[in-house]
Image (cartoon, grey):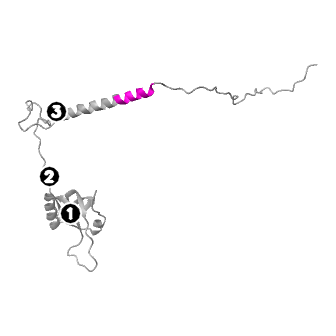
Amino acid sequence: MAPVRPPQPAHSVRSVPLVPPPCEVPHFAPVRVRGGRGQLRRLVRSRRRALALGLAVTAAAIVAAGPREASGPPPDAGHVRGHPVAEPVRERRAVEMVTAPVRIADAATVRLLRPGDRVDVIAAEESPTGTDARVVAHRVRVTEVPRAPAAGESVAEGGALVVLSVPRTTASRLAGAGATARLAVTVW
C-alpha cells in the first residue's frame, strides 16, 4: 500500500523564501585610475588660461573705448548719435555737503531716528484747497539726533530737532520750507 499524504487545500501556494540566501562577494583589489590628476591639472590650467585671455580681451576693449583726447570727436562721430564715444563726456563736480538742523513737527517720529538713517523730508502747507505736501529732501542722511529738552527747559516751537547731511542747495530749500510749513520725515 502507498503512503498516505495529508490532504492539501486546493489554493495552497508553494512557500518561496522572501529573502534570497546570503552570498559572498569575492575580494578584489581597489580600482585605480592612472593619469587622473594630470588631466585635472591640465583642465584647471586651460580654464585659467581661458579666463586670463578673456580678461585681457576685456581690458583691451575698455582701453580702446576709453575717453578720447580733447582734440575732438572721432572722425565718424557725426554718424553715430547718442553713442558714448561720439559725445563728449560731461564732468561732474563734487557736491558740497553741509549739515542742516531741521525741526520736525512730530517729536515722537524723531525719537525713532538714529544717526546714519536715510529719510525723506516732506513739507506740508495749508492752502485754500486743503493741505499740500511736497518732498523737500530725498534720501538724506541723519547725522545727529539732539537730546530732547528736559521738562524745566522751554522750547520756543513744538516738535523736535534733527541734524541732516544734505547738499548746499537742499539745505536752503529745507530752511525755506521750515519757515513756512510743517516738516515731517519718512524713514527709508
Residue receiving disc 1: 124
For badge 3, the amino acid type reads: Ala
**Nearer the camera: disc 2 or disc 1:** 2
The one nearer the camera, 162 or 31, is 31
- Start and end of the magenta stretch? 35-45
Find the distance from the CA under tag 2 to the CA under tag 1. Answer: 31 Å
Contact between marks 1 and 3 (CB within 8 A): the answer is: no
Q: Relative to 65, is 111 above or below?
A: below
How crowded pointer 1 is (Cα within 10 Å; few <14, some 14-19, many 20+) is rated as some
Which of the two labelled residues, at mark 3 and mark 2, occupies the earlier sequence position? 3
Residue receiving disc 2: 94
Question: How far from the left and from the top, in percent, is residue 64?
Answer: 16, 33
For badge 2, the amino acid type reads: Ala
Residue receiving disc 3: 64
Q: Residue at x 20, y 63 (%)?
A: 124
Residue 110 visible in the shown view: yes
Q: Is residue 78 left or right of residue 29?
A: left
Q: Report which quarter residue 126 is drawn in.
A: bottom left
Residue 131 visible in the shown view: no
Q: Residue at x 13, y 38 (%)?
A: 67
Element type at marker 2?
loop
Q: Relative to 3, is 66 above or below?
A: below
Identify the residue at the far bottom of this view: 152
Question: How far from the left and from the top, in percent, is residue 57?
Answer: 23, 31
Question: How far from the left and from the top, in percent, is residue 130?
Answer: 20, 63
